[in-house]
Image: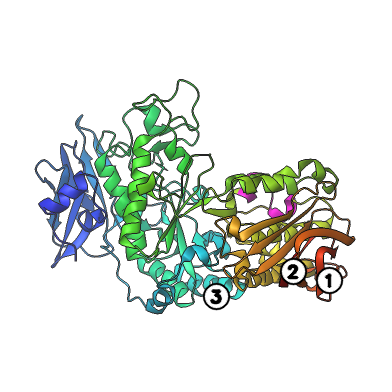
Amino acid sequence: MAANPDATALYYFNTGESACAYEMLGAHKTGDCWRFAVWAPNALEVHVAGSFNGFDPTASAMRQIENTGVWEATLEGVSKGDIYKYAITAKDGTLLWRADPYATAAEGRPGTASKVWGIPVHAWGDEGYYKAKAGKDEFKAPMNIYEVHLGSFKHGQSYRELAHSLVDYACEMGYTHLELLPLCEYPLDMSWGYQVTGYYAATSRYGSPEDLMYFVDRAHQKGLGVFLDWVPAHFPRDEHGLRLYDGTPLYEHEDARRGEQPQWGTMLFDYGRTQVVSFLLSNAFYWLKEFHFDGLRVDAVSCMLYLDYGRADGAWLPNVHGGHENLEAVSFLRKLNSRVSAQWPEGGRIIMAEESTAFAYVTKPAEEGGLGFSYKWNMGWMNDTLSYMEKEPIYRKWHHHNLTFSLCYAFSEKYILPFSHDEVVHGKRSLLDKMPGDYWRKFAQLRLLLAYQFSHPGKKLNFMGNEFGQFIEWKFDAGLDWLLLEYPMHQKMHEFSKQLNLFYKATPQLYERDGGWHGFLWVNPDDNLLSVLSFIRKDDTDAMLLCVLNFTPEPKDEYALSLTFGATAKEVFSTDEARFGGTGQWHNAKPLEFSENLTLRLPPLGAVFLALSNVKAL
């Protein structure tokens, strides 16, 4: 049960230091009554209007707590599940109907009211999950994320159904984490959840807040981590939402040059307002603490960091130093990441940035001048890689730098390598359909693409459908094309993805030293004429895995490599195995002993990984 607002809680809220404002604001049960509290500092009057009083905008008046901007009322005759809004009288006398920003449940669409709910409660059974993680360095652990839109994984399933179908599938396939597209309540299906009106309300599309808790709990009990996509950059203009909440700009900046995002038609949060900082900081903690999410993927960080993002010259307002950095947003992100690190000092929660610019020190600790994120999405690597792979193989020799440039900055941040939902929509085509050539070559190159992703330094993320070769673009309002698994090549692609996932988890060379040159060694980065890339990955014991990738359809019967040591090379994984849809012909069947010079057989449009043993310096 949440306590009544006291002076201390209100002080922390109004100074931008509260990480638990949801315990004070919103609707909470107190004895046989329900207490409502809302921040609306410029309102003339506020009333609670709901199904319990006929939505009468004058029936249940709230009182303003002096000099705090917060209004409260304690009402009898209210039950959990009742719907309500705040009837706010603005300074000009206009009556505004607003949903509760701190409501923990919402009416199903097309309704826009909040639900009386309180902080949801669940009997958690994931102690073993946290015990198994305790004391482990998560940066040295495998991270292979399956990104999912819950509404279209299997169309029509609820949180509780997905807690079995999706969780069991991800575990069987060898993924380590799920990342769920935004689940805060949103009115428009086609926004995919990125235009939020109810930041504390788990979307009612798939069930209750407790049902979502059940989903996370069961994932944890199966050893699967769960991340939530979170949108603290902007919010929509919907009448019941946050825009001009009490008739004045509260959550957005009063100047449109800072308060609106013209590209998206949405409003931007004002990180210079302390109550907005408390709202967002508390919201992050709400999902991490109450719902046990393992972390948040912060959407549109570039939009937060730059005042001129998506704006023409002269249409933005510089900061106090005349620059284009949003200093208040930088301060907020540092506070968010510092507070999360302090609350979970052993790295129990991960905060990831979707950030596409060269902003410095995104993953450097805040106390050292960075933003303090755990990871940053490597959008540069993703764009360069897909640009390369979409070219016909005959032209790739002139674009070899698209494969090698990423190593110039691969260790400047802690990176995640994403092939996300954004790459398979809006005419971009699916990953499989991006690949040039005939039917066989498309599948061969998709296997090669994923092998390159998994052998390159950085954690991994793939959107649902990539793993079995979804042919058409993602459709948010339909399920994945699971019927494709009735076709042999899709079956084999599916098996390849599973075995690649399992190989990754079982091979420390591919994850223990993601963060530096001590885990990576070029063998030949410069063979652009043959479009072959070769390098070595190392683990914490210095065990080595040789990775050789052939980006042309020409097999290489005697491909020569020069190394600075001798060893025995044993092929341990090939994208060209017949069970994966490959030729099954171009493998290195026997261990190869070599002294400096190694000759390999390379499959067409394929990759081979070889474990090196008995290493001897020359």
Q: Percent from the top left, x then y, of residue 330? A: 38, 40
Is 425 inside the magenta-drawn segment?
yes
Rendered position, 172 above or below 382: below
**Residue at the spot of label 2:** 610
Which element carries disc 3, helix, strand or loop?
A: helix
Q: Amino acid at mark 3?
A: Asp
Specify start and end residues of the magenta stretch as a single range.
423-434
Sequence-earlier tag: 1 or 3: 3
Name the residue nearer the viewer: 210 or 220: 220
State which quadrant residue 502 falls in: bottom right
Indicate which disc, 2 or 3, sits on the residue closer to the N terminus.
3
Secondary structure state at the residue bearing disc 2: strand
Residue 168's disc number = 3
- Estimate how packed mark 1 is, as few (under 14), some (14 to 19) or many (20 or more) residues with alpha carbons within 10 Å: some
Give the crowd class for mark 2: few <14, some 14-19, many >=20 residues within 10 Å: many
Contact flag, marks 1 and 2 (Cβ < 8 Å) = yes
Q: Considering the image in quadrants, where does the N terminus appear?
A: bottom left
Residue pointed to by mark 1: 588
Q: Which image quadrant: the C terminus? A: bottom right
Residue 323 part of the magenta-drawn span: no
Q: Nearer the viewer, residue 130 or 489?
A: 130
Distance CA(mark 2)–CA(mark 3): 31 Å
Tell us which disc is closer to us: 1 or 3: 1
Compared to residue 436, the image places residue 325 above or below, namely: above
Q: Residues within 10 Å of mark 3 (few under 14, many from 20)?
A: some
